[in-house]
Amino acid sequence: MADHDQLISQARLDLTLSGTDGPDDPTLWEHSFRVMLNAEMIAQLPAMSAEPIDRYALQAAALYHEAGWVVQVTSRQMRRREVLSRPTSDVQHELAVGMMASSLQGVLPARSLQRACDAIRSLNDRHGETIEAHIVSDADNLDQIGPLGFLHGLRRGMVMGRELAQVLETWQRQQEYRYWEARIRDGIRFKAVRDLAWKRLEAMGPFMEALAEHVGAHDVAALCGEPAAEARKGS
């Protein structure tokens, strides 16, 4: 029998990035914990009732699916601020498997730990057969859509030295090319999760409009009258 509290405690310890250049960075841990929560809820959908889901493997795979970043930071292959700045590679998934297998030895039953390893290894394989991988993939994609997705994009922009206005321009181009629509349609497997992703995406419209207005100080310019606001927009 696995110890759920021990699993969570160990994952939090492993995934909170520490260093001498500032306070601990909980970004990776918080993302991974949200993905685990998403995965647990997805596993309870009616459509999953007949699936042979190993709940311990699912939780572990969701928590450690991005752990390869930690390995690379610890080995000084990258800086802490670069974590989650690009899609996670197969190499990073393999590093995550190694870290998880070491950290969770004795915490999970051997069979569950092996299933968690298999799930992480197949996360980038759309045609993989591991149900835990399918669920974690949808849970991870869901965390990157909507307001939370903007935070991911903002982090990437900061790493690349982009100004906030440039991050907004990237969002606008994504809208023009229907990037998010394609990602939801092609990247999320389960219908109920796709439907929720659409709702999260819809929530972005008013938020991004307000953010663009505030970054450009358009609302302040409007206090001086419409011509002043329009002049500011064209500057």
Image: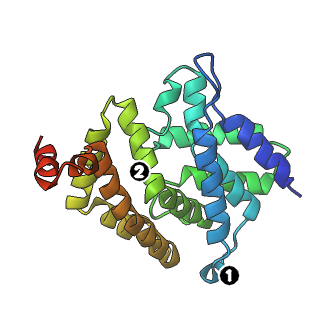
x and y, in percent, of residue 174 in the image: 26, 55
The reply to whether residue 144 is visible in this rendering is: no
C-alpha gap between disc 1 and disc 2: 33 Å
Which one is in front, 12 or 146?
Answer: 146
User: Residue at left 70%, top 35%?
Assistant: 14
Count of numbered circles in the view: 2
- Crowd tier of the residue under label 1, counting other residues whose Cα lies within 10 Å: few below 14, some 14–19, many 20 or above: few
Front position among marks 1 and 2: 2
> Mark 1 near mark 2, Cβ–Cβ under 8 Å?
no
Q: Which residue is mark 2?
A: 150
Against 160, residue 107 (above or below) is below
Question: Which numbered disc flags the more N-terminal residue, 1 or 2?
Answer: 1
Relative to 171, 113 lies left or right: right
Q: Which residue is mark 1?
A: 49
x and y, in percent, of residue 196 in the image: 49, 72
Question: Which quarter of the figure has residue 181?
Answer: bottom left
User: Residue at left 84%, top 51%?
Assistant: 5
Looking at this view, name the residue that lies furthest to the front. Answer: 224
Q: Secondary structure at mark 1?
A: loop
Against 54, residue 112 (above or below) is above
Q: Secondary structure at mark 2?
A: helix
Which one is in front, 137 or 209?
Answer: 209
Question: Which quarter of the figure has residue 235?
Answer: top left
